[in-house]
């Protein structure tokens, strides 16, 4: 039996993760993500995926982030009807995230129709809310740390990855005609000292390893994150400004709430209102209570009286109208709104109103992919295009990389040092080219591993011959 892999996304890019495996006559996709950022990447969401959709037998997801799951509704729209395997918290998150992604697509199409800037006439969403709902009956959620058979020759096991709620490293055992082989997909790896998530589990053996490299060329300073966060907030409060934090509704939002309310209770920052401007954040926060085994927040952090997510300084804004009312805010406050890379959603109208104001601050807390407004802000662009208008950037832009949900270079290497034997092949994925190639050099120099590849988009490899 032969085993082949094809990189349909997440290769030399942090978005669009899709890894196609042909295991004899069993064909499966690991992750099914949406491309985001650069226009040439986003265009791929509309193009042929690179395989006949009705020949795919199964999809396995490492976690719920849209760049790993957001293509699923499109896949179903093209006729995919087979199982989607993932962990239980990931399944719960998908029920929030996929309809939200669909709604964003629909809003963008409507907006493009109004402004007349789409190539499609009339402008079309990539998928609709109904398409997103069509995914749910296919989802089969499974526990961590147990081998699960998904085919007579293939077993998988989810291992804790940190990163976000439900995120998994996927181990896969393949039974050939003569030999057994093991593939390991790192998914996105979390930090070793995250305030909310535990560190990723170490894996000791893989014949083939796919490892992420988002921060493959980046060492996040070992600064005390909470102290820097306090200093930034205090600076903005002194000039009577507003701190605007673009953050995905799941993960960093909860970590920020935990850190900010603690800083207030300890008197290290003034008691300000924290506006969580997201229709999803309350539900996502509820999932942290439901899945308490998967993170560090314990009963005393989550129960009545001490509940960090019900802190008196937090205001959850669900409706669009409430969200718009924040535009008038002229006294010190903190606004947390999605999306984290400023690619769409409510953050856009906040940026539109806040960027021209010298006293305000945009605080970036996660990875900013190329081609996103977040990246433009980080690189110091003086004008940002929002709603078809050029908006001047007068607000201070700050980055708190220590709050990222991704392992940095040393942490990636720390995770890799857990392997007791050298994998036959190592593929560096989920990183822009400079990050992925820097990671390859580090692995070759430090561990003397051989056969380390940075695959290209749509590149195929024969992993095993006649096993
Ligand atoms: Zn992720």
Image (cartoon, helix red, strand yellow):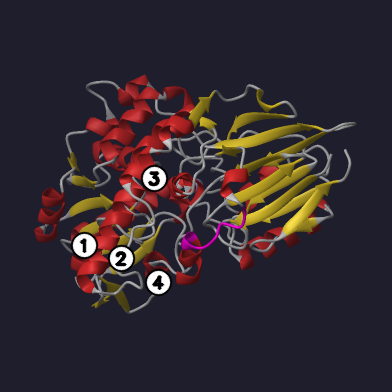
Range covered by the magenta-colored residues: 45-51
- For the residues labelled 4 and 2, the Cα–Cα distance comes to 26 Å
- For the residues labelled 1 and 2, the Cα–Cα distance comes to 22 Å
**Pointer 1 and pointer 3: residues touching (CB < 8 Å)?**
no
Looking at the image, is 276 positioned above or below residue 353? above
Q: Give SS at disc 2.
A: loop
- What residue did someone put label 1 on? 349
Q: Is residue 402 visible?
A: yes
Which circle, 4 or 1, is nearer the viewer? 1
- What residue did someone put label 3 on? 252
Mark toward the start of the polypeptide (3 vs 4): 3
Which circle, 1 or 2, is nearer the viewer? 2
In the rendered view of the protein, which quadrant contains the C terminus? top right
Q: Position of residue 33 (x, y in %)?
A: 51, 50
Q: Position of residue 21 (x, y in %)?
A: 69, 45
- What residue did someone put label 2 on? 123
Residue sitting at x 37%, y 52% = 127
Tell me which secondary structure the magenta stretch mostly adopts. Answer: loop
Q: Give SS at disc 3.
A: helix
- What residue did someone put label 4 on? 376
Q: Position of residue 400 (x, y in %)?
A: 41, 56
**Pointer 1 and pointer 2: residues touching (CB < 8 Å)?**
no
Which circle, 3 or 2, is nearer the viewer? 2
Q: Give SS at disc 4.
A: helix
- For the residues labelled 3 and 2, the Cα–Cα distance comes to 33 Å
């Amino acid at each position: 039996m032969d085993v082949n892999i094809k990189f349909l996304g997440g290769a030399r890019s942090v978005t669009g993760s899709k890894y196609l495996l042909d295991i004899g006559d069993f064909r499966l996709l690991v992750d099914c993500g949406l491309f985001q950022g650069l226009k040439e990447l986003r265009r791929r969401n509309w193009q042929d995926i690179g395989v006949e959709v009705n020949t795919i037998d199964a999809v396995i997801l490492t976690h719920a982030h849209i760049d790993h799951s957001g293509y699923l509704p499109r896949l179903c729209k093209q006729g995919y009807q087979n199982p989607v395997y993932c962990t239980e918290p990931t399944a719960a998150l998908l029920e929030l995230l996929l309809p939200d992604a669909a709604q964003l697509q629909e809003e963008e199409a409507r907006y493009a129709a109004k402004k007349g800037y789409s190539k499609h006439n009339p402008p079309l969403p990539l998928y609709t809310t109904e398409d997103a709902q069509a995914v749910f009956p296919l989802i089969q959620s499974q526990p961590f740390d147990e081998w699960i058979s998904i085919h007579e020759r293939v077993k998988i096991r989810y291992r804790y990855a940190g990163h976000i709620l439900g995120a998994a490293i996927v181990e896969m055992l393949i039974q050939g005609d003569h030999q057994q082989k093991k593939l390991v997909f790192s998914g996105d790896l979390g930090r070793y000292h995250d305030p909310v998530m535990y560190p990723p589990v170490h894996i000791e053996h893989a014949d083939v390893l796919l490892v992420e490299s988002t921060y493959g060329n980046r060492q996040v300073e070992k600064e005390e994150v909470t102290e820097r966060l306090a200093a930034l907030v205090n600076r903005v409060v002194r000039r009577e400004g507003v701190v605007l934090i673009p953050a995905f509704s799941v993960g960093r939002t909860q970590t920020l709430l935990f850190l900010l309310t603690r800083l207030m209770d300890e008197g290290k920052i003034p008691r300000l209102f924290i506006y969580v401007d997201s229709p999803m954040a309350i539900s996502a926060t509820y999932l942290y209570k439901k899945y308490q085994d998967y993170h560090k927040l314990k009963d005393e952090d989550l129960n009545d009286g001490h509940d960090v997510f019900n802190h008196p300084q937090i205001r959850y804004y669900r409706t669009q109208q409430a969200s718009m009312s924040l535009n008038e805010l002229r006294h010190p406050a903190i606004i947390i709104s999605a999306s984290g890379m400023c690619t769409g959603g409510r953050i856009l109208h906040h940026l539109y109103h806040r960027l021209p104001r010298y006293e305000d601050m945009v605080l970036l807390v996660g990875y900013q992919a190329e081609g996103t407004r977040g990246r433009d802000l980080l690189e110091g662009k003086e004008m940002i295009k929002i709603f078809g208008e050029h908006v001047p950037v007068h607000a201070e832009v700050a980055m708190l990389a220590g709050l990222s949900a991704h392992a940095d270079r040393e942490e990636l290497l720390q995770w890799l040092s857990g392997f007791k034997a050298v994998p036959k092949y190592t593929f560096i994925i989920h990183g822009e080219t400079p990050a992925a190639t820097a990671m390859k050099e580090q692995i070759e120099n430090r561990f003397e591993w051989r056969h380390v590849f940075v695959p290209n988009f749509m590149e195929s490899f024969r992993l095993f011959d006649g096993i």
